[in-house]
Each structure stands twice: as C-alpha cells, then as structure tokens.
Amino acid sequence: MTAISEPGSPSGAGPAPVLTARPRPGEAVIKFLLVSAAVLSVLVTVGIIGAVLQPALDFFAEIPFGDFFRTSDVSDDRPYAVIPLIVGTAITTVIALCIAVPIGLGAAMYLSEYASKRARKWLKPTVELLAGVPSVVYGAFAVFFVIPVVLKQWLGLEVSAFNSLGAGLVLGVMIIPTVASLSEDALSAVPLAMRQGSLAMGANRMQTTLRVVFPAALSGIAAAIVLGMSRAVGETMIVLMAGGSIKNMSLDPTEAHETMTGKIARTALGESPVGSTEYNFLFAVALLLFVLTFIMNMFSIAIVRRFRQAY
Amino acid sequence: MSAAATTARAVTSSTIATGKSKDRDVKSLVFLGALWFSLFFGVMVLIALIVDTVIDGSGRFDSSLFTHYTQSFAADKADELAAAGRDPKDLSVEYTGFRAGILGSVVLMMTTALLAIPLGVAAATYLEEFADNNTWYNRVIEVNLQNLAAVPAVIYGMLAAAIMSFLSVERTWAIGGAVALALLILPVVIITTREALRSVPEEIRQGSLALGATVWQTTWRQTLPSAIPGISTGTILGLSRAIGEAAPLVMVGFAAANWDPEFPFVFSSIEAFPLEIFQAASSPLAVVREAASAGIIVLLAMILGMNALAIIIRNKFQRSW
C-alpha cells in the first residue's frame, strides 16, 4: 500500500493537525499473523525437502549410487534401479504431451483469437471442467473403457491389459486444461497492434494466428508445455491404475511400464516397514521426482517472466 | 467495358469487402474446424466417460451405495455389525457401498477447509495488501507459491506422513489426510484470493484510508468483504479438487479403515471416497467393479456440482466496478 499521502503542511492558518498515528499493537499482531501465513508456504517447501531427504540419505548409505542409476528390467536382480521407472514415466509423459499440446493449443487459439468475449465466458470453464475430474476417475476410465474398448476393439491394437499407451492418452486429456489456459494467457498477451498489422497486410485470421500471434507467444506456450509436462510426470493415480507394475526398459507403449509415482504409491499401499530399504527407496525416488518437477517448474516460471517483459 | 475499368472495379470491390471472405478458403475452414474440434474434444471425452460409466454402473444406482460398507475390507467387522443389530447383508458383495468413504470424505473436507481457508486467505491478504513486492523475501514467497502449485500430489502425502510421525500420532487419523490436502489446495486458494483482492478498485481503499482508517481496518472492513465472491469461488474450486484427490491419501496410509468416523472426528481413522473407488475399481470381482462405476457417478456429481456452483458464483456476483 503506497497510497497513504504524506503529511503536507496545512495551507490554512491555525495549529497543524497531529498526523502521527496512535500506536496500535493489535495491528502489529495481525500483520505478524498474516506474514507467518505467507512464510508457511516457504516452510512447507523446506519441510518437503527435509521429510524426503533424510530417508533418501539413509537409502544411499545402504545402496550405492551406481545401483540406483543402473539400467535393469529384471526386478529381482536389481530391485532398486530407478532408470526403468524413468523410462516408464518418460513414455507416458510423451504420449500425454502428444495429446495435450495440439488439443490444448487449438483450444487456446480459438479462445484467444476467434471467440467473442461472451462465448469465452462460457467456453473457458467448459475446457477447465476437465481439470476438475479426479484422477481416480480418469484411471478407472482408462481401465474400463480406453484400454479394452478404444485400443483393443476400435483400433484393434495388441496391447497388454495394463499399458502405457492407455495411461498416457488419458493423462493427456487430464493436462489439456493446464496447457490450454497458460497458452491462452500467452496468446492474449500479444499486442493487438501486431494482429492489426498482419491483417492490414492482407493476411486472413488463420495466417495471422499461425504466423504472427503464435510465434510471438512461443515462449509463453513453451512454458505452458513445460508445466503440463511436470503435471504429467507427477500424476499418480492414472499410471497406478492403468500403467501396470512391470519394470520395463522397452520403449514400446503397448506394454506395461511402471512409473516413478506408480512405484511410490504401490509400495505405500503394501506393507513395507518404516525404515526398511524398500521404504527408503521410495523417498529416493520421491526426491528425484521432486527435483525433476522443481527444475521444470522453475524453468516454466522463468520463461513466463521473460516473455511478459518482452512487450 | 475496358480492361482498365474491370481491374479498377475489382480493386474497389476488394477494398470494400469486409475481409470475412478471406476466412472462407478451404485451409481456413479446415483450421477453424480443427480449433473447434480441440475445443470440444475434452467435452466429448467427458461425455464418453460419463455415458460409459453410467452404463457400467447402471445396475447399482440404489440407496445401498450410501448406506453399505465396502465388503472386502470389512469382513472382520461382521461380529461388531451383528452386535449393533444391523443387517449382515451390509457386508455382502452385492451390496457393496461407500458409506464409510462418503462420511470420511465429508469429515476430511471440513477439516481441510478449516485448515486451508484461513491460512490461504491470510497469506493472500498479506501478499496483496501489505507486502512490498520488490523485496527479495516477498519474491521468494511468490516464486515458492507458484512452485508449490505444481509439486506432485504424492509428495504432499509423504510430507503429511512425515509430519504425523514426527508428532508421533496415528497417521490414518483424518487430520493427517487433511494436512496433506490443505497443503495441496493452499496455492489454489491463495492465487484465486489474490486475484479477487486485486480486482477490488483502489478508490475504495483510498476512500477508507482518507477517512482515517488504518490499512488493516481498510482491508478488514472494505477490501475483504468486497472480495468475498472471488474468494468463495477459489475456495470451492480448491475443495472440489481436494475431495477427488487420492494419491496423497494413499501415502498417508488411508484405505485401511472401513468404518464410520468416530466422535472427535478429526482424531479417528477414516476412509476416503476416492480411495474406496480406487480399490473397488481394481477388484477382481465384477460386482464390485460395477459398484465402482456407480460410485464414480456419485463422486463426479459431487465434484461437477461444486465446480458449477463456483462458476455460478463467479458469473453472478462478479461486480464490474
């Protein structure tokens, strides 16, 4: 609040009014409470790092770093290898992005370039409705409908009962709103003058959208995609229910793969005692997951900040 | 007519044209069609999801969905059930219901709201009305909040589990899940509350300050009341996200209790609705999977209803100053 005016000298005659505020200890307390609520967010981050780091360190004290990052798809041989989990995560994430990027971008382009203000008021919540569907429901949808009906019957694919393709497709649907709403912000931030310039040169709306507005908003769209990717990497229930539980190094999406989040949740559902190597392995995986998504988020935030300053 | 005149006419007519005809070539129309398709793709998926689930669960839309327990996890409760004078069919597979989960989710929801709303609104009020955004610590808070919004939900569950074991209390108490969910929706509440506060015009604050009110009095009596529609929209959206979330609850170790929450609700082991659906959907028994489909429709009705409420509040009470 910078709006409080400075006490200027009164123009009229008479004694100057006392402008010094009465001290209000109650307000200081309130302000302190408000500050601590905001600071709590930082404490949560510190808490997450602390909660995850200690068991992860215990894990690495027991299992050498090399074993953690060794490639192996034989579960019994190297139970604590993380690379197969990363492969599984990467496959589902790539499939999800193949769905979410074109569709999210298309929706964003329509909303920012074509829709009237009134239409946007109703269309935007419609797209965002997808974000409200719980991931358990998407997971069940993948298992009950997408894999048996869409993939097996309609497309006639030879897929296993649980597979990365089905999980990835549904995951993609789930992150459409993330990509769409951030890309729409980026597209809407492109100044009107650029569109007018393009239209004045004789381009039609499609050419303006694709060749002028889209390149100008590219950095913001990149940020949207990175954020969508981080969502896909961190999503748990869909890959847990539909992705399968096989440590698999193959890149074939029709096979079952286990992802990082799926491994974490599946172990938590089982009975591994606190402090065991298997339990600590979870935290090592979670630490890796946190670091990966953290880097992606920071990257996305940095790009957004940069493109905002461009105009 | 001379050639020059025809050209002149062509030029004139092309300048007079509205420009709309330019959007009517094949490429443009295909492009527009693709945009329409992407816009409604999500809705089509949602319709497919709802139709398929309704068909799957069609045999199970009865009241036992709300009054019965999930069979597979309550078998050891049979004696207790008989002692309470209840029908033993409460535990039979054909009558699998989600009573424990629905009651548990209601308790969880209220506890989450109690934790997340005051905290979120306070943090947003500080950042929007008091903080100087140029200082480094406020920027740290800012970036941190954006980052928290994208931390995977499972990790919040791990944090809550760590907090509960640090306090050395039962992890499966409602409070454990509520902590995880409150932290999860905190960024949503903060971001929407800030937007609501930002849309309150500066003149209202200046008017109040000019009358001699302090910054806090202005915030409490003018700014916050004006922002209530926006704040409630954000809160409802956050809670509707929390009610469907299962991953953090798995980490806290829910999914074991299958009974009504007991009196000091916050300190009793509970079950959550989405987790029951997860377990039922993974069941090898077809009857239980059917119940899962029916349960999904109930959960979707709850969540889409809450989303619709939030949108109605936003559209109805949104003031243009």
Image (cartoon, rainbow, N blue to C red):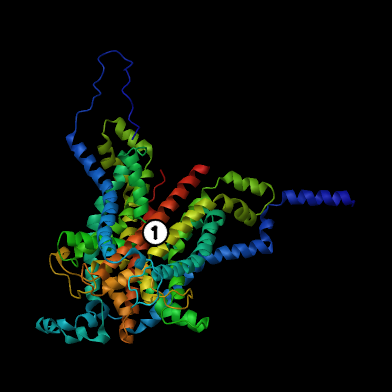
Quarter of the picture holding the N terminus of chain A: top left
Q: Position of residue A219 (x, y in %)?
A: 52, 51
User: Where B228 sits versus A174, above or below?
Assistant: above
User: Where B93 sits versus A33, above or below?
Assistant: below
Which residue is the extreme one toward the right? B2
Viewer-side residue, A204 vs B176: B176
Q: Position of residue B49 (x, y in %)?
A: 42, 74
Q: Which residue is mark 1?
A: A292
Horizontal side of residue B6 vs B179, given as left or right: right
Residue at screen point 30% across, 34% down: B208
Q: Please indicate, yes or no, whether residue B59 appears anywhere in the rendered image.
A: yes
Q: Position of residue A178 (x, y in %)?
A: 44, 59
Q: Position of residue B83 (x, y in %)?
A: 9, 83
Which residue is the extreme one toward the top? A13
Residue at screen point 53% across, 54% down: A112
Residue at screen point 18% across, 66% down: B173
| Residue B35, quarter of the rendered image | bottom right
Residue type at mark 1: give it: Leu
Viewer-side residue, B205 vs A147: A147
